[in-house]
């Protein structure tokens, strides 16, 4: 069968999609190794290991683009450890979670500390909004 434009093709060409996630930067086809997320409320860019799933408001970056990442003036870049961290929760993770639950369960003590000058946590190195940077227990 022919039309005015030429022969009609019965097959629809298919494009094979690679299972490897690619860098989100324009014209970069390298494989992604890190995921970038912006926390607008804290003016923070968080760069961590490649997320398990592609999220709509996150950006996957290759090794080169993740190393060269800079944030806008006034923003902070938080770089999380790569995949060398244990995949399963460790005893330290569970202890930190238990401590956070205990702290949240004492609202009257937190209000009193806020009014009368709060004692600094010896593990806390810096704070920005709701994010805290903690000292390694080894140091």
Image (cartoon, rainbow, N blue to C red):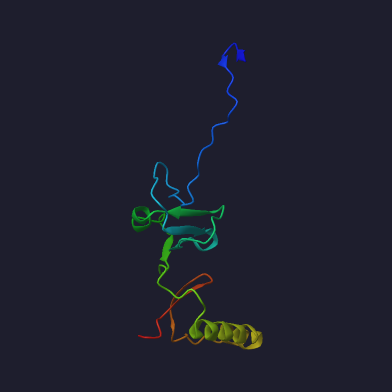
Residue 64 as seen in the image, left or right of residue 38: left
Q: Residue at x 58, y 29 (%)?
A: 11
Depth check, front residue: 134 or 49: 49
Q: Which residue is drawn at 54% across and 32% down?
A: 13
Depth check, front residue: 129 or 50: 50
Quadrant in the rendering for residue 122: bottom left
Q: In this view, does 11 lie above or below 129?
A: above
Quadrant in the rendering for residue 75: bottom left
Q: Is residue 139 above or below residue 5?
A: below
Q: Position of residue 135 (x, y in %)?
A: 40, 81
Q: Where is residue 80 in the image (x, y as percent from the top left)?
A: 42, 68
* Quadrant location, the N terminus: top right
Q: Residue at x 56, y 87 (%)?
A: 116
Instruction: Answer yes or no: is residue 131 visible.
Output: yes
Q: Is residue 55 above or below residue 93?
A: above
* Quadrant location, the C terminus: bottom left
Pick out the residue farthest to the top. 4
Instruction: Answer yes or no: is residue 117 visible.
Output: no
Q: Where is residue 42 in the image (x, y as percent from the top left)?
A: 51, 63
Q: In this view, does 46 lie above or below 119?
A: above
Q: Position of residue 35 (x, y in %)?
A: 46, 58
Q: Which residue is drawn at 41% across and 58% down?
A: 33
């Amino acid at each position: 069968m022919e039309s005015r434009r030429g022969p009609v093709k019965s097959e629809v060409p298919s494009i094979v999609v690679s299972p490897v996630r690619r860098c989100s930067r324009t014209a970069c086809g390298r494989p992604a190794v890190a995921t970038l997320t912006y926390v607008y409320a804290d003016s923070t860019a968080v760069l961590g290991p490649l997320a398990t799933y592609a999220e709509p408001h996150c950006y996957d970056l290759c090794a080169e683009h993740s190393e060269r990442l800079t944030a806008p003036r006034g923003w902070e870049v938080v770089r999380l450890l790569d995949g060398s961290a244990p995949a399963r929760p460790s005893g330290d993770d569970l202890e930190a979670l238990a401590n956070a639950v205990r702290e949240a369960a004492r609202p009257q003590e937190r209000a009193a500390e806020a009014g009368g000058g709060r004692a600094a946590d010896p593990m806390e190195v810096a704070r920005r909004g709701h994010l805290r940077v903690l000292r390694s227990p080894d140091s």
